[in-house]
Amino acid sequence: MKVTRTTPTLLIVENTPWLFALLISIMALIAVTVGIIALTTGSIIGGGVVLSVSALIFPLFLYFIAQRVQIILNTTQNTMTVRKRTLLGYTNVTHDLHDLSHAELDTNYDDDDGSQTHCPIFVLNGGMSAGKHKMTATHQSGHGPGQIVDGVNEWLTAARRDGHLRTPVDSARPDA
């Protein structure tokens, strides 16, 4: 995920997982090749199983992992637009930008080796979609997700400071 455009009134963040899509496609081609070789050498059951499993698993991987996400924060239109494109379709969800509180990291910890993976999320304080929403479908290691969160929060702070965006009202009920 990376910031592809930033101005005082517009921020565009995109995630296009070309590497994942390429790796999944290569693994699918290898599996299909193994299945066809098994069929031509006389192993009808083995080749059929490999081809059947490949036909079920790899399209699911491509659908859930290889999705393009584009998030557009626009103060002139007062919108936060989340666009997602998968192999089977396109979705476009628009939120009121004033409902956007901030971005933060969702972190998963692996107890076995102590590693961490992160996913940037948006926190909406108002509207029908109030709550936390992931920017991507998967968690990633490294500093990239943290840099996206920092970039979004810095842009929101500057937009509020410059008067392009008002501070959201926290509509959550207080904890008892």
Image (spheres, helix red, strand yellow):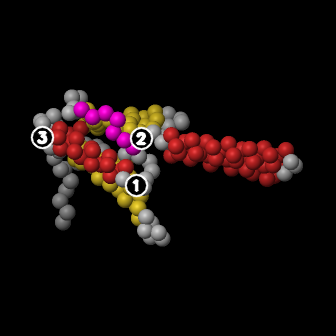
Marks 3 and 1 sit apart, C-alpha to C-alpha, by 30 Å
Residue at the location (68% across, 42% down)?
29
Mark 1 is surrounded, within 10 Å at the Cα level, by few (under 14), some (14 to 19) or many (20 or more) other residues, namely: few
Residue sitting nearer the eye, 7 or 43 = 7
Residue at the location (35% across, 56% down)?
106
Please name the amino acid that badge 3 sits on.
Arg
Q: Quadrant of the C terminus?
A: bottom left
Is residue 48 found left or right of 134 in the rendered image? right
- Residue lying furthest front in this view? 143
Residue at the location (36% across, 50% down)?
145
Provide the residue designation for mark 2: 15
Q: Give residue 143's position: percent from left, percent from top.
A: 36, 53
From what the image shows, is residue 45 above or below residue 108? above
Q: Is residue 6 magenta?
A: yes
Provide the residue designation for mark 3: 161
Nearer the N terminus, badge 3 or badge 1? 1
Please name the amino acid that badge 2 sits on.
Asn
Numbered range of the magenta stretch:
1-7
Check if mark 3's residue and mark 2's residue have beta carbons within 8 Å. Answer: no
Mark 3 is surrounded, within 10 Å at the Cα level, by few (under 14), some (14 to 19) or many (20 or more) other residues, namely: few
Provide the residue designation for mark 1: 142
Please name the amino acid that badge 1 sits on.
Gly
Marks 3 and 2 sit apart, C-alpha to C-alpha, by 28 Å
